[in-house]
Each structure stands twice: as structure tokens, then as C-alpha cells.
Image (tube, rainbow, N blue to C red):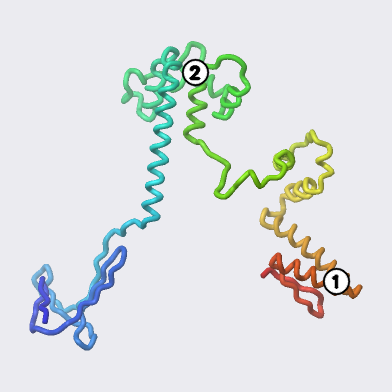
Amino acid sequence: MRKIKSNIIIQEEIMYNIGLDIGTGSVGWCLTDENGYLLKVNRKGNNGNTYRNSAWGVRLFESADTAADCRIKRSTRRRYNRRRMRIIELRKIMSDMIMPVDPNFYARLDEAFLWNEDKSDKAKAPFLLFNDNGYDDVKYYTDYPTIYHLRKHLLEKEGRADARFIYLALHHMMKYRGHFLFEGQSFKAIDNIEDTFIELEHLVNVYVKEKEDTDNNSKNNALYQTIKNYLADNKVKNKDKKEDILDEEIEKLIEQRTEAKKNKNFQLADEIRQQLLDKGIVLEDTRQGVKWKRA
């Protein structure tokens, strides 16, 4: 025997059941009698009046994060902390080279997000990066429109470069570093790495539509010509290009199978059917001809 307390007015003592529906962002509840019927209770409102309502309700609250969400946030924090530590270490290494040239270089970078009125005296300057006589940010961005132009210049330049140029290039590389490795990828599976890079060069040449071809033999390469023809057709979408190549192969195999059946070479016809089936292609012989579909 239980009594309903709180602001619910009890008229008599009765047996009741409590049902709870507990979720990640809510808790639902209801009261029923011994027969499972929903109870009616009297509630006193804020204005002092009494109302008779069904004894059920729900309480909502902010859902907790799942383990996967917490793991993603934790990984993000680690990535940002490691990036910050890489930049700090880079500054320590480059400090002896940059301070004699531009003592306030780091201060300007640290306070770049502030209004000029809110910056310290060290960070106040007409330009953010360079304020030398005869060389400023306007000249810098004219010479190097993007950070990649600067990196290319440093790679090809002979002789000593400005320490600030080196810092900006290394800062970009360490902050936005990346890799081209994927889980399970291994270069041991490549039989001939030289041939792989030659083929990759051909693909790049086709993609950027270079007119000059340093390797005349590559024009006679069947794979090169096939990829070139499909990439040059702008009316065909990438998805359609993949399917068109595969469809063409299927049609050729079906023609070979049909020819084999005409020549009563049923063994070859069965082998071609099995070959297509292994690729997920199901053949159906009808009066109108051979139809196929993807499994």
C-alpha cells in the first residue's frame, strides 16, 4: 500500500503500480490501478484551484554523450594539443635565428586577432608579417600569393633564405601536416615501383590535360588512351564512366558467349557465364536475347 504524496490530493488509500520509461534524454512515468487502468488524480494548480488529471507525465533533460562522441572530442583535443606543442617547439628552434632579425615577429603573430588599439606595443605595426625597409606584406603577397609559392621558392632557392620565410613554411607544414597512408596499405605489395610511378605520371598528365607529352610511347598505351578518352568527355559523370567501362566488358563477354553457343562450344559458354557470375553479373537467356543484371 502506497500513498501518492507531493501536491496530489489523496482521497483514499489505493493499490497502484508505477511504470517508468527511462531513456537517454527523458523519463516517462504513469500510475495504474491493479487492473492496469490509468489513474486519475487531483492536482492543485498555482492559482489554488484543484484539477483532475491523468497520472502520467514525462521529464526531459539533456542527453549524455555516447562513448563514440566522447572519443571523437578527446581525439580532437589531443590533435589540437599536439599541434600547439609542435608550434611551440618550432618557435624554440627558430627563435635564435628570428629574434636578431625581427624581435617582435612572434608578438605580432600572437596578437594578430586583436584590434590594433588592444595590441601591446611590441605587436603594433603597420603590417603583420614584414615591416622592413623596402619590404612589407604587400610585397610578400605579391611575390608569394599562397604559402605553396613560398615553399616552392625555398625548395628551389640556392643560398641563405630569410629565417621568417623558413618559419612560415615550416609552420604551415607542421600545422596542416598530412599523410597518404591508409589502414592496411603496404608498399610491399607493389611488384615494380618504377612502373607504378610511370603509370601514375600518365594519369596525372591526363587529369591536368597537359598537351605536352614527354613520353611518346605513353600515347600508344591502351590504358592511357582509355582513361584519356573518358576523362575528356565532360558530358559523362564520373559514376557513369566507371559503369560504362564495366558495361562494355560485359557486353563483349556476352557476345563471346553467344558466338560460342552458335559454334556449339558449350563448355566455353558455361565458363563465360561463370566468369560473369563471379563478378556479380547474372545472365538470363530469353527469346529477345540475353539479358543481364547485377546481383
Q: Position of residue 223 (x, y in %)?
A: 78, 48
Viewport quadrant of the C terminus: bottom right
175 left or right of 199 in image:
left
Residues packed near mark 2 inside 10 Å, few (<14), some (14 to 19) or many (20 plus): some
Disc marking residue 93: none
Establish if 201 lies above or below 103.
below
Image quadrant where residue 22 sits: bottom left
Viewport quadrant of the N terminus: bottom left
Which residue corresponds to the image point at 58% horizontal and 42% vertical from the top-left?
180
Establish if 5 lies above or below 146.
below
The local secondary structure at tag 1 comes to helix
Image quadrant where residue 67 sits: bottom left
In this view, the residue in front, 118 or 19, is 19
Amino acid type of the residue tagged 2 in the rendering: Ala
Q: Position of residue 89 (x, y in %)?
A: 41, 27
Which residue corresponds to the image point at 58% horizontal and 22% vertical from the top-left?
154
Which residue matches tag 2? 163
Which residue corresponds to the image point at 79% horizontal and 35% vertical from the top-left?
213
Amino acid type of the residue tagged 1 in the rendering: Thr
Which residue matches tag 1? 258
